[in-house]
Image: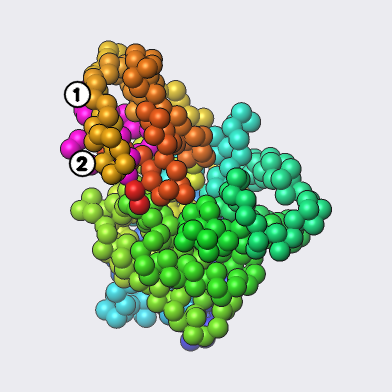
């Protein structure tokens, strides 16, 4: 038994994978046919598994039966196995001499870090039959039968990305790149729109714009917070492009500048000017681009995680996940010293354990929108192989796909549904991409007849508020109205009694002010959305549709 290093088909960029192989007479040692368009990805239905949890057994094939051309065990959706002689079979043999089995956990153990979450190992059939007795590994992939729903969601996101009326979002582009199927022409057009958007603020160097590192370290103006997170996502997207546009030096310099501005805010106020979420994204993007980060910056994140300062509720899961991905990247890419690497590894695995412990009985971690971030951590750290929370959270996402109805939320969930994390971008290598995805236009929602009444309550339990309950009124709205529609109806009905403001974000409108009370990041408060008596909503104001007779609470809270 020897070692074979091969290129595996994934999302347009191949990454090195470690295989065991047995070379016998009549077996093609290359592991594939030169005429195979998309090797390594075929229909689950056409390729039954063998002895792997969640994969059905492989029955013996009659010698006269036509053999599948290339049937990896437990592979995901792609062209189904065709008929014809297989280059993987010994002469006159009714069974494959070699089968491809996804064992990411063992792959990671043999060659950490595993460059993609779908590493496959080739084993002789006899050893493959014995594996269930000695290896309790499970596939780090969505359950069998989910490929159709995931593909449909990808097609809907592609349709939204093709709408020129929508502002381009780097997170959407990342989701298009971290997928099994592509539309290269539409993705290229979307990338060009992103480049046009970022050319204006970042098209010139810091010196040409009159900035310097000294300015960043000694700036006292907080009038315009740095745009750390959005630039970080854009840089991640560029690195996921085939081939990556180059050079990125000026953009990387701008990101370092924003991180320095955030660092200045952290030194002065005890937290970044933006948020630890954006701060962590910035560190992750620099790491993926193989850029070193000052140890002081990293230790600031370590201290924030250790003291529980990374956020509240679902936001805490999002932030902890981004920070854990950044820690894992820095440790895996050897961008820090040995002692700090050990601390980062322990912190990342600690974050993974805490997310598993925070999982609810419904499988959700934090809320439905933070759950994909937790799954990224399980995938990046390899915990998906042994952590039952991974399987339960993946099932929860698949059961609640209707919650991901906007481009931003689709972009948040699709990478993990394809089995990838943002950390996988660091190990991508370009190869021919399967041009097999077709945009799917979103169908307009059907009209729901009738009306409903929603009780709207505004609370301020903070000590400086003059009263706990500031507003309590029934609001009559159309039956299909969202929470945003309820707020708009209340403001139209009593403009002097009720008013509110929102801020547009890539995730949809964000509630910032109610009855003149503004939620401000620097004051560490926010408007919490609940359904009575005390259940936090899992969706935003534009997505959540309250039921008739439901009581909704807007509560100004601190974190």
> In this picture, which residue range is highlighted in magenta?
531-557
Q: Which percent across, then down, holds residue 531?
A: 24, 35
Residue 212 percent coordinates (x, y) = 74, 60
Using the rendered image of the protein, determine whether residue 80 is visible from the camera's viewpoint. Answer: no
**Residue depicted at 35% across the width and 52% down the height:** 559
Q: Is residue 167 above or below residue 79?
A: above
Q: Is residue 452 visible?
A: yes
Instruction: Verify whether residue 423 appears in magenta.
Output: no
Helix, strand or loop for the magenta stretch, by majority: loop
Disc 1 secondary structure class: loop
State left or right for residue 68 relative to residue 489.
right
The answer to which of 428 and 334 lies nearer the viewer is: 334
Say the numbered circle drawn on residue 534: 2
Name, please, the residue furthest toward the right.
208
Q: Decide which of tag 1 and tag 2 comes sooner along the chain.
A: 2
Give the side of residue 70 with respect to residue 95, left or right: right
**Pick the front one: 181 or 291:** 291
């Amino acid at each position: 038994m020897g070692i074979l290093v091969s290129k595996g088909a994934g999302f347009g960029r191949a990454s090195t994978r470690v295989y065991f192989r047995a070379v016998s007479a009549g077996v093609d040692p290359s592991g594939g046919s030169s005429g195979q368009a998309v090797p390594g990805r075929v229909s689950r239905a056409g390729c039954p598994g063998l002895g792997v949890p969640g994969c059905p057994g492989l029955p013996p094939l009659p010698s006269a039966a036509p053999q599948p051309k290339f049937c990896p065990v437990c592979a995901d959706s792609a062209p189904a196995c065709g008929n014809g002689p297989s280059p993987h079979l010994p002469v006159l043999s009714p069974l494959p001499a070699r089968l491809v089995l996804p064992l990411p956990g063992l792959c990671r153990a043999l060659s950490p870090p595993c460059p993609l979450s779908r590493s496959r190992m080739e084993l002789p059939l006899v050893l493959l039959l014995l594996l269930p007795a000695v290896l309790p590994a499970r596939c780090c992939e969505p359950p069998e039968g989910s490929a159709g729903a995931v593909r449909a969601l990808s097609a809907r996101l592609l349709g939204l990305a093709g709408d020129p009326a929508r502002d381009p979002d780097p997170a959407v582009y990342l989701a298009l790149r971290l997928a099994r199927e592509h539309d290269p022409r539409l993705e290229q057009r979307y990338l060009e729109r992103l480049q046009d958007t970022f050319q204006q603020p970042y098209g010139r160097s810091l010196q040409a714009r009159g900035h310097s590192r000294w300015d960043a370290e000694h700036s006292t103006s907080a009038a315009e917070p740095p745009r750390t997170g959005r630039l970080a996502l854009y840089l991640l997207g560029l690195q996921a492009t085939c081939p990556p546009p180059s050079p990125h030096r000026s953009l990387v310099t701008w990101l370092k500048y924003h991180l320095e501005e955030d660092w200045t805010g952290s030194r002065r106020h005890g937290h970044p000017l933006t948020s630890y979420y954006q701060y962590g994204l910035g560190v992750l993007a620099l790491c993926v681009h193989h850029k070193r980060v000052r140890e002081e910056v990293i230790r600031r994140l370590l201290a924030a995680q250790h003291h529980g300062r990374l956020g509240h509720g679902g936001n805490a899961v999002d932030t902890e996940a981004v920070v854990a991905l950044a820690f894992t990247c820095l440790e895996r890419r050897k961008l820090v010293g040995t002692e700090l690497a050990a601390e980062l590894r322990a912190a990342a695995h600690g974050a993974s354990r805490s997310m598993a412990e925070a999982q609810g009985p419904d499988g959700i971690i934090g809320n439905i929108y933070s759950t994909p971030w937790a799954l990224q951590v399980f995938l990046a750290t390899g915990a998906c192989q042994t952590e039952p929370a991974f399987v339960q959270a993946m099932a929860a996402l698949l059961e609640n796909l209707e919650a991901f109805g906007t481009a931003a939320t689709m972009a948040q969930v699709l990478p993990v549904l394809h089995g990838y994390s943002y950390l996988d971008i660091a190990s991508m290598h370009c190869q021919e991409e399967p041009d097999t995805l077709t945009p799917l236009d979103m169908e307009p929602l059907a009209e729901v007849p009738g009306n409903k009444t929603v009780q709207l309550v505004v609370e301020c339990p903070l000590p400086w508020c003059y009263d706990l309950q500031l507003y309590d009124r029934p609001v009559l709205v159309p039956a299909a109205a969202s929470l945003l529609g309820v707020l708009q109806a209340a403001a139209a009905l009593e403009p002097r009694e009720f008013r509110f403001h929102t801020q547009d974000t890539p995730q949809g409108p964000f509630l910032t002010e109610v009855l003149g009370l503004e939620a401000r990041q620097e004051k560490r408060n926010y408007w919490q959305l609940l359904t009575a008596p005390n259940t936090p909503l899992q969706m935003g104001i534009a997505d959540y549709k309250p039921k008739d007779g439901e009581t909704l609470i807007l509560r100004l809270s601190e974190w």
